[in-house]
Image (cartoon, grey):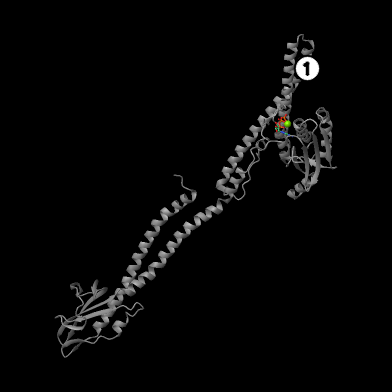
Amino acid sequence: MTLSLRSRLLLWLMVPLAPFVIATALTAYDAARHTADYLQDGTLLSSARTIIEDVQWIDGRLAVAVQPAALEIFESPSQDRVFYKVIAQDGRLLAGSNDLAVPPEGKGRPFFFDCHFDGMPIRAVVYSRQLFNDGKSDTVTVVVGKTQGSRQAMLDRMWRPLLLCECLMLFLVAALVPLGLAVELKPLMQLKNDVAGREPMQLEPMHAVGLPRELQPIVDAINQCIAQLKLHSETQRQFVADAAHQLCTPLALLDTQIQYAVRICEGAACADALNGARRSTGKMKTMTHQLLLLAQAESAPQRSDTQTDLAAVVASVLSELVVAAQARDIDLGAECDDHMYVTGDAPIFAALIANLVDNAIRYTQRGGRVTASVNREDAWVVLRVIDNGPGIAAELLAHVFERFRRGATLVEGSGLGLSIVRKIAQRHGGSVVLGSGSDGRGLTVTVKLPAWAEREYRDETAAG
Ligand SMILES: Nc1ncnc2c1ncn2[C@@H]1O[C@H](COP(=O)(O)OP(=O)(O)OP(=O)(O)O)[C@@H](O)[C@H]1O
Ligand SMILES: [Mg+2]
């Protein structure tokens, strides 16, 4: 069983504290009992002495008239009952209750004892003194007892506040530990949310604010791990980019060689085989180009001071793709506002737009319509590529941005275009959303990018 940190801390505190509290409470109780007994016994003895002072010789016999002062010292809010007994040496009762027991130990010096009288527990003292008169002597014994009410009240007054304080202390510990932990672990929870909410490729170091010093090494270790991941992913990306780049030249060479072979080969079967090889080379070239673009998109600088007019890039891309559109009788058009500046390099945005327009041209039926528009919406420059083709099936929509994910189509492709588009948008602080076309059919891809002026302004305010 795994115990929570709260339970563990509570155990660490409560296990030693509870016996400590019990031991101190018992010690305090014992000390309070001794004090209460000492005070009570003192009062009993002084009452017995006062009574003995009242014993007199009258006509050669002992007689006593107990003064109220001898019993008044017992007065208390507890209204204890007091019993006494005065007897002569021969056992003659001089005053008080005859039923009160006289223990034999009372001769000579005061003796305190506990007993029951009239069905009640009492504390009593027996005290004897020898009295002389005209050569005669007699021993007078006084027993004074009282019920335990005031003694118990005194004991409670001395002991209970301490017990209460100690229980309060235990309660405070039990309440403050979880509270303190909750407050102190808040930065750790924020760190957890930060880690959990990260994008897979978000590899910036973590900044834990307000974290206890003891937990800082954990953040350092996470950051170290992030740095290693970053290095690893950059090495991999660089490898893909290098491999794609290195493949471009031999593929182009291969294409030329196959073209030459087609020209000089004799026989239809040989030409067919060479043409098939050329188509495969073409696919490889497209795939290599897309891989290179993806690597470039992933390594595009997130901060840049280059501004690019997205409307101009759209115009340039459309002019390159107009031939492909005409080949499929597609009505390719643009509706762009002027001066749609965003932050970043023109070639990377050209790759984004080319992929979207290329998709629209390739997947829309012959004679269809494709429109690219750029305009400003608040702090955003919004690019839309709208077509009236078949659109994307609902079940594919959620996965279409994944690498190598393709729809059920006969059109050739590598399945990387939309991954490239999303990566470029994200690297530039933007987003991509897919929706249906303008008249309910087809596809609209909406790319939002922070407008240049707003971005500049935000950077300034962040720095200031
Ligand atoms: N405008 C569109 N209309 C209909 N389907 C589309 C459209 N754009 C993309 N798709 C669907 O989304 C899938 C993924 O597109 P994506 O651009 O990522 O890859 P691709 O076009 O297949 O290959 P690549 O672009 O790498 O050559 C496509 O296979 C296609 O099924
Ligand atoms: Mg594509």
Q: Is residue 234 left or right of residue 260?
A: left
Q: How many numbered dots are placed on residues in this image?
A: 1
Residue 75, image x, y percentages: 33, 80
Q: Which residue does the image show at 35% across and 70% down from the upper left?
A: 155
Q: Is residue 373 left or right of residue 232?
A: right
Q: Amino acid at mark 1?
A: Thr
The single residue placed furthest to the right in the displayed view is 338
Res 206 seen here: yes
Residue 60, image x, y percentages: 15, 89
Q: Nearer the viewer, residue 253 or 396?
A: 396
Badge 1 residue CB within 8 Å of ligand 1: no
Q: Is 210 drawn above or below residue 409 in the view shown? A: below
Residue 166, image x, y percentages: 43, 62
Q: Is 332 drawn above or below residue 248 in the view shown? A: below
Residue 128, image x, y percentages: 21, 78
Q: Nearer the viewer, residue 85 or 341?
A: 341
Q: Is 294 drawn above or below residue 78 in the view shown? A: above
User: Which quadrant of the picture is home to ligand 2?
Assistant: top right
Q: Give the residue number, with chain letter if any, for mark 1.
A: 256
The single residue placed furthest to the bottom in the displayed view is 59
Q: Neighbour class for label 1 at 10 Å: few (<14), some, many (≥20)?
A: few
Q: Nearer the viewer, residue 22 or 382?
A: 382
Helix, strand or loop at disc 1?
helix
